[in-house]
Amino acid sequence: MQKRWSLFVWLLASFWVCAGVAQPVQVTETASTNIKIVSAIQITVLNNVDFGTLALDASSVTLNPKTGAVTAGNGAVSVGRVRIEGEAAQGVIISYQAVALPNQTATFTPSVIGAQGVKGQSNATALASGTAVTLNRNGRYHVWVGGDLNVASASTGAFSGRVTITAAYNF
Amino acid sequence: MKRLILTTLTVCLLTGAAFAQSTANDDVTVSANLVPAITVTQTANLAFGNVARGSTNPVMSPINGNLTAGASTGSSTVGQLTVTGAPGEAVTISAPSSLNLTQSSGTSLIVFTPSFAESASASTGYSAGSTFTFSGSQGGTSAATHYVRVGGTLNISGATASGAYTGTLTVTVTYDSL
């Protein structure tokens, strides 16, 4: 009798031990991710800024990016033009910075405007650096660059400057 | 004790453009050709000398500085300006069409009508006119030099009082295309 009882206890204990050290229950879940593939953003400079020939008898000369009009000089000017391409209707942030090259005695301050349409120059919107815009249904946005050239302390000779324009998706 | 095991879904795209470029930049260059401003320097004043009242008004030629009409004694000199500016650029000389010469005391005045001549040389080759083009090629950045002479006519009447008369003529030289 005692042996059977012991056996029972032993079996019961074994069961408890086994139950206490139960195998972990695996639960699997899936995490879904959404990925949208978009076109790589591209920026193309189509035209550079040129103030033409300027006499050093004005302290500052302005090139209007909307009209191409210049306040002094021989008028042989060109407005800078940039095309941004990417995913249709995608938001983009445009930022820019004038770079002062060495040994230049004049200083340039850019005036930048933009529009969705390539023919929108005359009504384009003024863009401060860091402005968010939207690419058109063809994935394009157009930017024009004019600005002010301060020649108050300038010497004669060729002036060279640069404006770095950056376009970044605004996801 | 249950352990929850999450399986994560890892997606790896092995395409030609696996990670689309999300930023791009480029440079717009800015250029200008800066040429000299115009400078005008007076190197001789215009003097008619001693002029007698007569029937002919004195006229000084800006081309050679000689009195071509009227009578004068004493020294007379043609007005002289040295002008510098951008090579190859055309300019126009402008001044009031007439100037009243006055006495230091008294109300009598003489009307002076200026005329101009220009030359690339200081002493010779003057041509009558109020326009000229600096020598050299357009776009050059070293200043070119040109010379302007000022002559003109004095309108003296029989009622013009005797005495010394003076006046200041402001001559302006302006680029036509800059």
Image (cartoon, rainbow, N blue to C red):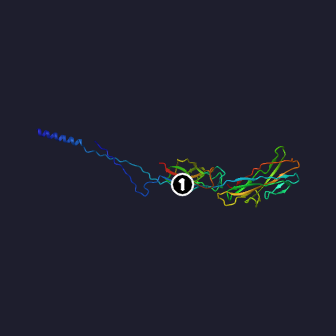
User: Between B126 and A108, which is closer to the camera in this rendering?
Assistant: B126
User: Between A158 and A42, which is closer to the camera in this rendering?
Assistant: A158
Residue B144 percent coordinates (x, y): 68, 58
Q: Is residue A146 left or right of residue A38?
A: right
What residue is pinned by disc 1?
A: B27
**If the image is split into quadrants, where does the N terminus of chain B sit?**
top left
Residue B62 percent coordinates (x, y): 79, 57
| SS at circle 1 | strand
Residue located farthest toward the front when viewing the structure as drawn = B74
Label 1 CA crowd tier, 10 Å (few <14, some 14–19, many 20+) = many
Q: Is residue B80 left or right of residue B26?
A: right
**On the image, which quarter does residue B146 sit in?**
bottom right
Q: Is residue B135 left or right of residue B77?
A: left
User: Between B70 and A137, which is closer to the camera in this rendering?
Assistant: B70
**If the image is split into quadrants, where does the C terminus of chain B sit?**
bottom right
Residue A31 percent coordinates (x, y): 37, 47
Which amino acid type is shown beneath numbered disc 1?
Answer: Asp
Residue, x 15% and y 40% (percent of image)?
A: A8
**On the image, which quarter does residue B78 sit in?**
bottom right
A141 relative to B124, above or below: above
